């Protein structure tokens, strides 16, 4: 592997370790307080999965964003793809849109069109 690629990998590793954000969701919390979702920068594979939903104009992109990016304080996924149907049918869509929008604040608009975060604001 080239030195350049090694430096690029190290840069991203440093970014992952230093740019963890927290999104609070009072509606999904418990007696100890709001649910805290931890969010690291999304790699290209995650962005691609979300983009595939968003490019079809599907609001499932909001659910995909939460499933792929919502982590606990140890960096473990809070949700799995098996949770998708429950999110779609049984969870408040306004909360889903808000949470996905906050989670996706760091995603760049690579299409020239609406970002996933913007979809949740309409």
Image: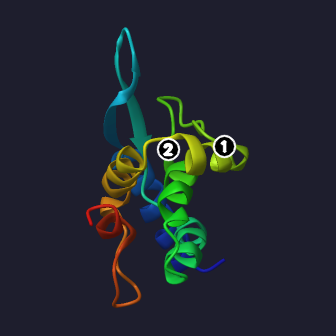
| 5 left or right, relative to 116 | right
Q: Position of residue 58 (x, y in %)?
A: 52, 73
Residue drawn at point x = 67 percent, y = 44 percent: 80
Where disc 1 sits, the SS reads: helix
Q: Is residue 50 above or below residue 86?
A: below
**Mark 2 lies on residue:** 70
Residue drawn at point x = 60 percent, y = 80 percent: 2
Q: Quadrant of the C terminus?
A: bottom left
| 40 left or right, relative to 5 | left
**Which of 93/82 is in front?**
93
Disc 2 residue crowd, few under 14, some 14–19, many 20+, Cα 10 Å: many
Q: Is residue 22 above or below residue 27?
A: below
Whichever of labels 1 and 2 marks the residue nearer the N terminus, that label is 2
**Which of 11/93 is in front?**
93
Residue drawn at point x = 37 percent, y = 54 percent: 97
Front label number (1 vs 2): 1
Q: Position of residue 42 (x, y in %)?
A: 47, 61
Q: Is residue 106 above or below residue 39?
A: below
Q: Position of residue 27 (x, y in %)?
A: 36, 29
Disc 1 residue crowd, few under 14, some 14–19, many 20+, Cα 10 Å: few
How many angstroms separate mark 1 from mark 2 (CA)? 12 Å
**Mark 1 lies on residue:** 83
Residue drawn at point x = 57 percent, y = 36 percent: 78
Residue at the extreme right: 82
Residue at the extreme top: 31
Where disc 2 sits, the SS reads: loop
């Amino acid at each position: 592997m080239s030195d350049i690629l090694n430096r690029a990998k190290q840069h991203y590793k440093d970014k992952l370790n230093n740019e963890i954000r927290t999104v609070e969701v009072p509606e999904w919390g418990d007696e100890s307080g709001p649910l805290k979702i931890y969010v690291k920068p999304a790699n290209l594979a995650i962005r691609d999965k979300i983009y595939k939903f968003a490019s079809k104009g599907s609001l499932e992109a909001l659910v995909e964003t939460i499933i792929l990016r919502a982590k606990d304080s140890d960096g473990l996924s809070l949700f799995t793809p098996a949770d998708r149907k429950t999110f779609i049918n049984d969870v408040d869509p306004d909360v889903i849109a808000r949470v996905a929008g906050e989670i996706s604040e760091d995603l760049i608009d690579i299409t020239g069109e609406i970002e996933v975060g913007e979809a949740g604001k309409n």
